[in-house]
Amino acid sequence: MSPVRRKDSLPIYNRIGVLRAERGMSRAQLAGLIGVNPQTVGALERGDHYPSLDLAFRISAVFDLPVEAIFSRTEFAPLSTELYRNARAGAGAGEGESSHG
């Protein structure tokens, strides 16, 4: 979730490191899957490098997630917070419904 700082442009945050760790994937493994060297994966994770659009799509394909789930102009909330929020929203969806049939 590192920002990329470029003079006047907005930062780009990413979840590459978190997603890689969740899957037990090394930088070298991800690099091989997306066609870059492991140093590039490290630079992306640290926020030292912007991905091209093509590279962002290749990364999203590896993780089977939309690009916006991996990259953002705003900092990501921790995944645990989002999962908890979604679980609470799902639990509340059934409230007030009647089981008349």
Image (spheres, rainbow, N blue to C red):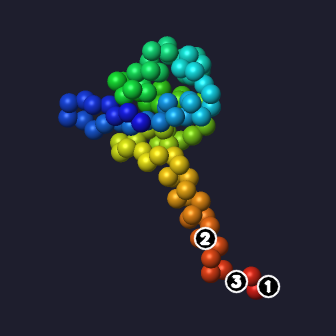
Q: Which residue is mark 1?
A: 101
Check disc 2 and give the amino acid type.
Answer: Ala
Q: Disc number at residue 98? A: 3
Asked if the residues shown at circle 3 and circle 1 are in contact, with their CB atoms under 8 angstroms apart, the answer is no
Q: Quadrant of residue 2 in the image?
A: top left
Q: Find out whether the residues at labels 2 and 3 contact each other: C-beta distance under 8 Å.
A: no
- Identify residue type, mark 3: Ser
Q: Is residue 13 left or right of residue 41?
A: left
Distance from the alpha carbon under mark 3 to that under mark 1: 9 Å
Q: Residue furthest right?
A: 101
Q: Which mark is residue 93?
A: 2
Q: CA distance from mark 2 to mark 3?
A: 12 Å
What x and y, as percent, mark residue 81?
A: 50, 52
Name the quarter where the C terminus is drawn.
bottom right
Residue at 49% from the left image edge and 31% from the top image edge: 16
Q: Would residue 96 be found to the left or right of residue 58 on screen?
A: right
Question: Quadrant location of the N terminus?
Answer: top left
